[in-house]
Amino acid sequence: MAIDANVYTPKSDGKGFNGSGIGYNEVLTYKRYLLEWTEKVVENANRLGKTLIAFSHYPMVDFNDGATDEMKQLFGVNSFQAHRVPNEVVGEIFADMGLKVHVGGHMHLNDTGIITTKNGNTLTNIQTPSLAAYPPAYKLMTIKNTSKLEVETVVLDSVASFNSFFENYKKEHGFLRDNFPDRMWNDTILASSNYLDFTNIHLQELVRWRLLPNNWPEHLKKSLLNKSGWQLVQKVLGEDFSEKELLLKMNNAGVSETDFKNWSGGDLILDFYRLRNADGIALIDIEPNRLKTYSFLFDVLQRQTGNEDILSLQLFALIFQKQMNGEESMKFKVHLE
């Protein structure tokens, strides 16, 4: 079932229409007929013994692994496409109609969102990544029987001729070097060994040029940038632990001082975007031991009280942890009964 959930409202000056960027939230106000139509389609599918899968442009369920409120608080109400997060009532309405599966796009995120209503009805929103950004991937859905659907995420790590235009990019980079050196991008992207590597470096540059300058509060950037993981741990703990106690605590967690010195606050930010965009796919690019150090740092952060200097770091840690522990998105089953 294809749902046209795009809503174009007239501009206040009468000249044209507003875009459809808000997504499903405006459907409840301006396209009520879609709800009635969807309910009829669901009823017919059930009556005829059909497996119904809904598709539309925007997600029906929160795509931030439950971290939307914290993200608005830390980064602002307009950051991270927060205005496109559906109100919880959206998912509840469609779930209580009997809709079980919805596939959404637009966000360029690999994510699974699940909502269960007070009536016990469950809707799974499968958020599809983009083929042209990190992570480049698509979804395969296999209907096993009337009660089970299997979903697999296929990563486009190898794409023929992905580097076809690299010679043109080299010319552009040379022009910038000679004329606008302050606008130069990282030319190591032209040494990418495969398509996944190419999109990964593109994400790094996107974070550096657009996302950090536009979305991140200065105090949080100051807390993280140009600091090693070891410096961050020491900053968080302050005088609460002696170095001996800290090393013992890290040993019990299976991490070392060297592990923390191998990454910086900038790496932490990049890995946050990797996990946010790619979910399980990001584990290709983030070493397991680094994730262990992140978990150690976040655990230490959440245990601190009364230190106003680290409040924003604590909130960021909470958001990061929710992104790390969202619903399975790589290979999973959707139960249809």
Image (cartoon, grey):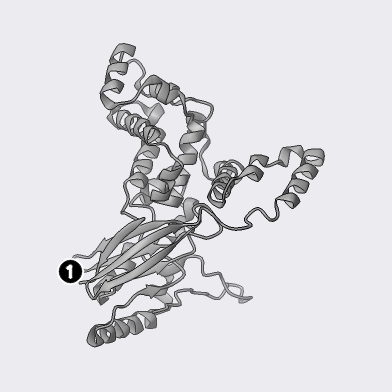
Residue under the point 51% across and 34% down: 266
Q: To which residue does mark 1 refer? A: 119
Could you say where residue 101 lies in the image, as x and y percent from the top left? 32, 70
Question: Could you say whether the residue bearing mark 1 is in a helix, strand or loop?
Answer: loop
Q: How many marks?
A: 1
From the viewer's side, name the closer residue of 146 and 203: 146
Instruction: Classify the position of the N terminus by image quarter.
Output: bottom left
From the viewer's side, name the closer residue of 302 and 109: 109
Residue under the point 56% across and 57% down: 159
Residue 326 seen in the current view: yes
Q: Amino acid at mark 1?
A: Asn
Tell which residue pokes out farthest to the left in this image.
Answer: 119
Q: Is residue 256 above or below residue 298?
A: above
Could you say where residue 157 lies in the image, as x and y percent from the top left? 51, 53
From the viewer's side, name the closer residue of 74 and 259: 259
Label 1: few (<14), some (14–19) or many (≥20) C-alpha neighbours in 10 Å: few
Residue 240 seen in the current view: no
Could you say where residue 295 lies in the image, as x and y percent from the top left? 33, 34
The reply, left or right, for residue 189 in relation to residue 91 is right
Q: Is residue 130 above or below residue 147?
A: above
Q: Quadrant of residue 32?
A: bottom left
Q: Quadrant of residue 17?
A: bottom right
Instruction: Classify the position of the C terminus by image quarter.
Output: bottom left
Residue under the point 25% across and 87% down: 48
Q: Quadrant of residue 261?
A: top left
Could you say where residue 271 lies in the image, as x and y percent from the top left? 46, 40
Residue under the point 48% across and 52% down: 80
